[in-house]
Image: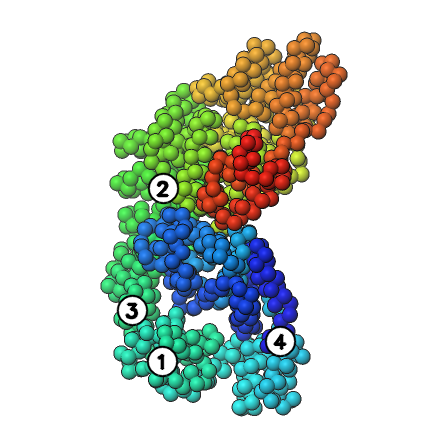
Amino acid sequence: MLYGRSTELAALDELTAGAREGRSGALVLRGEAGIGKTALLDRTAQSASASGMRVLRVTGVEPEADLAFGGLVQLLWPVQDRLDGLPEPQADALRAVLGATRPPTRDRFLTGLAVLTLLADLAEQGPLLCLVDDAQWLDQATSDALLFAARRLAAEQVAMVFATRDEGFAAPGLTELRPSRLDTGDAVSLLADLGLPPALRDQVIAESAGNPLALIEFGAARRDDPGSFTPVTVADRVLSSYRTQIAALPEKTRLALLFAAAEGRGDLPLQMKAARTLGVGLEDLEDAERAGLIQVTESTVVFRHPLIGTAAYQGAVLARRIAVHQALADAADDPDCRARHLPLATTSPDDEVASELVAAAERAADRSAYAAASLLHQQAARLTPERRAQVRRLTDAATCALNAGHAGQARDLAEQAERSSPEPEDLARLAPVRAAVMFESGERREAARLLLRTHAAGPGLGPAILRTGATYGWFAGDADSVREAAERLASLGEADPMVEGMAHLVDDDYARGLPLLERAVAAGQDGSDAARTRALHSAILLGDDAAAMELAAAEVARCRAQGLIGALPQALHLLAERQVLAGAHRDAEASVAEAVEIARDTGLRERVAWLGGVPARIAAIEGDERRCRDLVRDVPDVGRVAGESALSLLELARGDYEAALGRLETAAGPGPQRHMAMAMATVADQVEAAVRLGQSGRAERPMRAFEAWARAGGQPWALAVAHRCRALVDGREEDYREAVRLHGQGRRPFERARTALLYGEWLRRARRRSEARDTLRSALEDFEGLRAVPWAERARAELRAAGDATTSAKATAENVLDRLTPQELQVVRLAADGNSSREIAAQLFLSRRTVEHHLYKAYPKLGVGSRRELARLNLV
């Protein structure tokens, strides 16, 4: 009987009922030790089993908190026979977790996707309940995987419940439920069976502060010893009570309990194998079992409550704990299990032990358990007698911490290693980690300079450091770093066309720089992943929309195919920017929506904010001022140009030219970023605002730079915009006509429409009203297609002034695709292309049932009833 838990039970029952009806969900039970979380899980498991739900359960154990995937192994061991049904990269990731194979897992989030798919597949046979107790003691790799799966649940018939203490196990995005303390009436009911006198019962209730475990333990203790009372916290009093019970046991029983607590997983054969070396046998557990402190089966030992294990471990002297851990290490057949006990059994430097820990760290890193790998490298460093080897291991620990997403810890470890060694070679190995942390924290110029200094101190370090330094320098606006990196690469015989091209761009030498970027694009088409990445960024710098779109789409496809979940948000971001330029606003919003969802699910919070620049640009084009300003507000400083560009476009559309021009002049600033962001996105806005103010001189310098860039690159859209800008300033019709001609070869409908609008205005002022009407109608058609409301209104106003009396404001015809959510749009397009639900699920990192749920919702919105009908629709 659970007293005082009606609210909690109702929430848990609702969760499991939803899963049975096809609505997945996840819940976190958070509260202090003894508040009744495990009892709630037990009751939920019983109720679910009685209703026909399958139950998987795992309990975090404190000694395994740093054992890579220890919790996930416990959870998935009973269902490992289902791995063959997963997509191959996902199956390989879970086989590595379970120890069946050791293929390197390239993305630390792939395991979470595999868990989601596996749980969804299990739920195909009936609703599934996944219970996680003591989640605060799960290793991070397990936590990451389970939380990724929990956040992406939708329609899989899966319910997940995590029980955790107040501290640890951050689970943002999941609903939390805090079990309440018991009121007096429920406390009296709970204590009824103990037969305490009313006065003593009331004392126990007061001491226990409504904590159910404390009520039971204190009640039993006061019944046996009415005078016992220690004025400390509830948790400490419960722990003290358990220590007292353990202290009353025979010495060998206490030692047997210490083995159980130190081993942590409840592996009775391993415990007994190790315990025999210290003269302890199975019979020595009997007194603890009779006292109700443990439950023993043929193969397991389980503490009635985790605090009993804590009491057994903390109550032992250090020498005994060391001896027990050494015995467990010697008895372990699993090298990772041995590596877990060795550091706790070693008190002085020992290179052999350190080497075993390094091997365990490498195994953990192969499975993408970078947090565990970092800790193992740290432990290895602590036990390494030779100073430089210690520094190398600290460096490896810092690298793994960075890969795990712990930038602060990576910085601390790198600084610790740096203090330990002044050797240039050691500092060089540290530099990439330190620079990456600096770059992520906003110190971009310093990061670039650090890598260049490092390479100068050790020129044999290879070109990768120089390429990274050039990239950091570019984004920092540090022209000197870009030039220096290019010169050093050339001196090494490793000239990189992208870096060399950027170096010429920072010197405004477009004629030499852009052809080099064209070479980088060509080289990357069939090259390595790194070469294709450089090709994509080179295409963006060139303004080569066709190549950039193709390369961005290929990068997204590669991330999907290889399960590179952590890299996908950035790839989708780059693709979305290209889609906006192509006028595919709904596609761009779908790309951003997916990127935001994945970034949130994987804890990449900075990427979520950065992504806001894309929909902000769309909102600016469409005239949604409130949404635009809300989105720009969250864009980080590094995305300032994108944010200011969106806001200036809003101001330009409504005729606030001084505000638009001032904003753009402030945002431009010095440095190489202007070539990428400003020249491609905002120079035309600067020119138009300046001309409208009668101050064209304020835009002359950026316009000349843009013209030179456009001529050197030869991209039709860029040449068209350059001619439009020159036409605005000089008023020559031939520039307008050439701009219109070139736009016919380009891919940017918004720029094409703006050119037609400005040329139509010029024709109207020249009293060539018939020609003006034709040009303005073309602009209006493009603006309406883009839902660019303020620009369409300007075009209609010009048409009326040109004598088109039939033109009036009208609602834009609804596109049937607008009825779909971004994810529904992605799903129906893939389905229309002939992909199965399972194939779509693998590409979008969803479950098959969630894909079919989206299709089920999308069909009536589109007026179809099957995939065959879907294939006949125009979904572009």
| Location of the N terminus (image quadrant) | bottom right
Instruction: List the residue tagged with mark 3.
Output: 332
- Front label number (3 vs 2): 3
Instruction: List the residue tagged with mark 2.
Output: 451
What's the CA distance linking mark 1 and mark 3? 17 Å
711 and 173: which one is in front?
173
Mark 2 secondary-structure assignment: helix
Residue 287 horizontal side relative to residue 199, left or right: left
Kindly indicate whether the residue at mark 4 contacts the one at mark 3 (C-beta within 8 angstroms).
no
Mark 1 secondary-structure assignment: helix
Question: In the rendering, at what x and y percent does residue 668 appear?
Answer: 54, 31
Kindly indicate whether the residue at mark 3 contacts the one at mark 1 (C-beta within 8 angstroms).
no
Kindly indicate whether the residue at mark 2 contacts the one at mark 3 (C-beta within 8 angstroms).
no
- Asked if 442 appears above or below 361 in the picture, the reply is above
* Residue shown at 41% from the left, 39% from the top: 558
Label 3 vs 4, first from the N-terminus: 4
- Asked if 21 appears above or below 572 in the picture, the reply is below
Label 1 vs 2, first from the N-terminus: 1
Task: Please tell me how crowded label 2 is: few (under 14), some (14-19), or many (20+) other residues with Cα within 10 Å.
Answer: many
The residue type indicated by label 1 comes to Ala
Task: Please tell me how crowded label 4 is: few (under 14), some (14-19), or many (20+) other residues with Cα within 10 Å.
Answer: some
Question: In the rendering, at what x and y percent does residue 367 appear?
Answer: 36, 54
Instruction: List the residue tagged with mark 1.
Output: 256
Label 1 vs 3, first from the N-terminus: 1
Residue 685 horizontal side relative to residue 273, left or right: right
* Residue shown at 52% from the left, 24% from the top: 747
